[in-house]
Amino acid sequence: MRRWSGKRIKVFLLLFLQKKKKTQSFQFFVGVHKSLRRRKVKKGSGMEKRIAVVGAGAVGGYVGGHLARNGYDVTLIDPWPEHVEAIRGDGLAMEGVTAEEACTVRVPTMHLTEVQDISKQRPIDIAFVSVKSYDTEWATAMIGQYLAPGGVVVSLQNCINEERIAAIVGWGRTMGCIAARISVDLHAPGKIRRTVPKGGAAHTVFRVGEVHGRVTARAEEIAAMIATIDSVKVTTNLWGERWSKLCLNGMRNGVSAATGLAGNAADRDPDVRRFAIHLGGEAVRVGQALGYDLEHIGPLEPDMLARAHEGEKEALEEVEALMLAAAGGNTRSDLQRPSMGQDMLKGRRTEIDFMNGLIVAKGAEIGLPAKAHARLVAAVKQVERGEVPARPENLYPV
């Protein structure tokens, strides 16, 4: 049975005393105390490692919350004060598409102003960075100084940020973890909702990888942790996986932000669907020209998607059929809205420059224009500035 150290007791007493409502504070303290007493640490299981999740929003909160639920030593760190306080007071409530997925987890949570307290605590072995791409550098610099000697920073983000992380902590401390077609949203403080079924045997959701492409013990250890949440693999193709995810995000995120449509509604609109196919095909061709070994783009084979974009009738028919089947089936809820669409609704800055903007920039470097992506970047920025409302007409043929 795990025993409490003096430092651990001090940390949780500080959390206890910070609460405004004594009853809520007591419930939080007792809940965490019970969870720590229940945790049995098996050497080599990874449960002895201390995990921090910087950015406990939709994906970060979902992964961190479920790791804590499954017995791992997790601390959530988030910049949204109301979110942190909601978790402290009532726990982190998570739900999915089945009743069995609903749970509430008690997990230690920190405001950004409290992160300095880690200097007096056990250092961080695994830090998942799950903030927006434009926050990557400061989030990495903040948590990097509290890493254990063998500690690692894992990018659990939508875009390609490993190079930004490595510039701060070094390539040897940098890893990536891709969450493919997970579709979660933070719809209220302390409340996270998954709007697609778990992957299971049908679809590998998480892909953990080293930047050099080799399978290592630490990659296998992190994958084993994540396997307690959903399907996972250790990939030897992190960069190809990243660009493949970028192709899918490039087809969906900015489209939702510019049109105001949720995922299924966007695919059901013929003009928006065709525009998304052009986005996907352009991204595939740029990625191939850059030398990436592309994986499937959701259910779509990369070259078929590119041929559909280029006007091949049979390929276009097949791609559209697959997109319509997904929109009309049970693969995702009508509530599912890509993260950039969620950001637009919440009035937050989008990641358009790090997603479609990156495809435009990389295409320009190799002389391969990505015209659809350039148009989407312009449309999203117009909506962000309030010059036009989010509406499907923003992407209709001109």
Image (cartoon, rainbow, N blue to C red):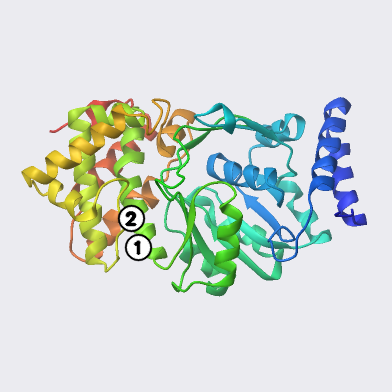
Using the image as rendered, state which of residue 317 and residue 358 is in the foreground. Answer: 317
Q: Give the CA distance from mark 2 to mark 1.
A: 6 Å
Q: Is residue 254 left or right of residue 311?
A: right
**Direction from residue 367 to residue 21 in the image, left or right:** right
User: Can residue 353 be spotted in the picture?
Assistant: yes
Q: Amino acid at mark 2?
A: Ser
**Disc 1 designates what residue?**
240
| Residue at the far front in the pictured view | 201
Dot label at residue 261 = none
Determine whether the residue tagged by mark 1 lies in a helix, strand or loop.
Answer: helix
Closest to the observer: 166 or 43?
A: 43
In the image, 281 versus 104, the foreground residue is: 104
**Label 2 environment density (alpha carbons within 10 Å; few <14, some 14–19, many ≥20):** many
Q: Quadrant of residue 150?
A: bottom right
Classify mark 2: helix, strand or loop: helix
Q: Which residue is mark 2?
A: 244
Residue 113 locus on image (x, y percent): 73, 47
